[in-house]
Amino acid sequence: MDWHLLIAQLLNGLQLGLLLFLLAAGLSLVFGIMDFINLSHGAFYMLGAFICAGVASVTGSLLAAALAAVTAVFVVGAVVEWLVVRKLYAKDHLDHVLVTYGLILVFDSVARMIWGSAGVAIALPDALNGRIEFAGIVIPAYRLLLIVCGLLAAAGLYGLVTRSRLGMLIRAGASNRVMVTALGVNIGRLYRIVFAIGAALAGLAGLLIAPLTEAHIGMGNEIIITAFVVVIVGGIGSVKGAFYAALLIGFIDTLGRAYLDDILKLFLSTAAAETAAPALSAMSVYILMAAVLACKPQGLFAPAGRRSR
């Protein structure tokens, strides 16, 4: 086995897992605390990428563009919660799905009017275009930065949820919203903050991946289903669960695409293995979700005492 290639694939899996975590963490909090199914969460992922690309083209600073994008998506998330989402909390999940699907169409149309239908690339500074070699392993500098940013964001979110008063309210809301309301907490404001934080995390994930894939219309729709799988596997409302589930799914997806055909060739013909491997690799995360639901329907790390609406 080529250990250098294996380590490179593990780093790719870590990168994918961290991006999924940023997208799924906010989705899990919104779902867990507000019992709100937000199909439009991927639109904030797309919005973060487009805003970052637009600001970067004007200022020439990737850092300034990233800060502007995260701030703008946070504000947009708060406005969307105030104008649209807050009216749906008492509605059925079918209403959530229908309205947030409509929001997807609105965001896609607005993005198309502002930035056009073609993808928008984000140019990296020279310092991030190079490669870093360590112990014979060559790692693109930007991918390493992406991993570091993802880990820092995960650590920051963990600190927010576990070490702050807001985090205490978030955890309490995920376990028992009725009790939190009875204690005098402004639940409407808490919902707005949680929704905006979730949107900002999705925007951060979008702007981090945009230099590698370009910002394009519908990019959030391509990954939102996997993010829901992460939420279900990790446990609805659990940030820790979203982190571990995202890493697990990232590694399974990456290593499956890289090595599953070689494993199948041990039992099948080359043609059959090469035909079956891509399909099985694409199915692997859903097989994992089915197995987790069969064994632990609440997810691997569901918050203790969580109650349904």
Image (cartoon, helix red, strand yellow):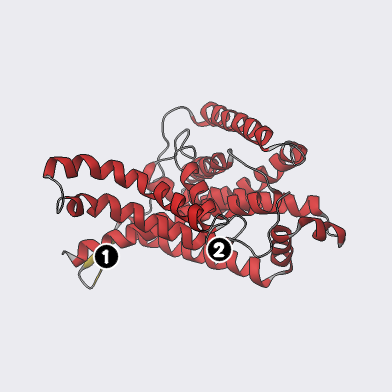
Q: Secondary structure at mark 1?
A: helix
Q: Position of residue 214 (x, y in %)?
A: 40, 41
Residue at (38%, 54%) from the top-left corner? 125
Q: CA distance from mark 2 to mark 1?
A: 28 Å
Relative to 9, is 118 on the left or the right?
right
Residue at (55%, 54%) from the top-left corner? 297
| Three-letter residue code for mark 1 | Ile
Q: Position of residue 263 (x, y in %)?
A: 20, 54
* Closer to the camera in the image, 109 or 71: 109
Q: Position of residue 83 (x, y in %)?
A: 75, 37
Instruction: Find residue 7 and name its label.
Output: 1
Q: Is residue 142 visible?
A: no
Q: In the figure, 51 relative to 106: above or below? A: below
* Closer to the camera in the image, 289 or 128: 289
Q: Is residue 309 visible?
A: yes
Relative to 5, is 82 on the left or the right?
right
Question: Disc 2 vs disc 1: which is toward the camera?
Answer: 2
* Closer to the camera in the image, 19 or 113: 19
Residue at (73%, 51%) from the top-left corner? 191
**Residue 17 lies in quadrant:** bottom left
Residue at (64%, 49%) from the top-left corner? 31
Q: Which residue is mark 2?
A: 301
Image quadrant containing the N terminus: bottom left
Relative to 247, is 257 on the left or the right?
left
